[in-house]
Image (cartoon, grey):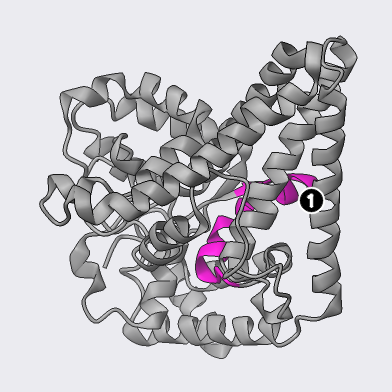
Amino acid sequence: MTPSTEHLTVEDIERLGAELERLRERVMSSLGEDDARYIRRVIRAQRGLEAAGRVLLLGALFPPAFLAGTASLALAKILENMEIGHNVLHGQWDWMRDPEINSTTWEWDHVSTARSWQQTHNYLHHTYTNVHGKDRDIGYNVLRVDPEQEWKPIYLFQTVTNAGLAMIFEWGIAAFDLELDQIQRGEATWKDKLPELKAMGRKAGKQALKDFVVFPALSGPSFVPALVGSVLANVIRNIWSHAVIFCGHFPVEVETFDEERLEDESQAEWYVRQMLGSANIEGSVLLHVMTGNLSHQIEHHLFPDMPSRRYRTIAPEIRDLCRRYGLPYHSGPMWKQYGGVLAKIARLSFPGGHERTLKQRLRALPFGRRRAESLRGRRAEAVAA
């Protein structure tokens, strides 16, 4: 139990879980040709943007071509990583039975191999979301993003560490996916990790060769500006994905949990943990597409294998469920979410932070500290529904 859920009975939580199950079943049974056309359209647009960016950078000596090529390539990389690669690898489009657009065959434009990313993200993170000691995404082993993490002197520099991580985010994730900390804990040896190191080395080598050697070399006399454009496109993509992911996982209102929470956890309780451990970004349809619909992080954590385009259609229903059951629904514009995350990272670079974080989380609750009459009314409404 947490302050967010102490007003709910076991029956309330199971009833909430049943409502979510019915919502999921309704959406998944309605998937069809419109959804398939959507993802194929996005893939065509992404490939067109990438081709345009590569062609424009052939003339990167000319500033307009350099700027347009860099922007086009950056957009293509964002689309591929966020709305396509991330979601395809979650199995969101496996129902199409298309051998190309499938979680078992897709290899994305990223230095992480699909297989290693699926292990750390699809399995570890989505199963044990925000559980200390189980979800390694809490701080990615380099940042203190929750006061329950033990403070270390190295965290004094984490505002700088975070800025550096944002610029090389795909490389940081690739290193994180190797789980080399298992060697430090004696759970694995370098020999055990050798196959993964080789696989990542091959993938990273191909990515670096493609982006930083082959395509810039094709531009001949424009090699240097073409290389700069390719580097910038990758940096822009990294900063964007870093911002989106941090906005969805690390706002101060988002809750973390002790490992004991997992004992005998039901599916309904898992749903509640996902809702309390995520936050959304408000914005336009274009923003949602460019974030891979991870602007609907709450909905994504509830249903990670649901096609991303459906998240914005079910978001009002999820928000209403939270209202009826008295649960917080963390959502805000990107500037507010990201600004809050950066402020939190700066504060937690120093020891402590428990009291302030708890106060901010309590202020985010829909009923403040206590409003029993409202809670009873909302619960009765939920029972009637």
Q: Residues within 10 Å of mark 1 (few under 14, many from 20)?
A: few
| Quadrant in the picture for residue 62 | top right
Residue at 68% of width from left, 81% of height from top? 95
Q: Choose top left, top right, bottom left or bottom right for residue 252.
A: top left
Left or right: 182 in relation to 44: left
Q: Is residue 137 visible?
A: no
User: At 28% across and 62% down in the image, what residue appears?
Assistant: 2
Identified at 46% across, 36% down, the residue is 171
Vertical position of residue 213 compared to residue 358: above or below: above
Position of residue 289 relative to residue 346, above or below, is below
Residue designated by label 1: 285
Is 190 on the left-hand or right-hand side of 30?
left
Residue 82 visible in the displayed image: yes
Query: 312 or 44: nearer the eye?
Result: 44
Tell whether position 289 is magenta: yes
Q: Main secondary structure of the magenta part?
A: helix
Q: What residue span does the magenta drawing correspond to?
A: 281-305
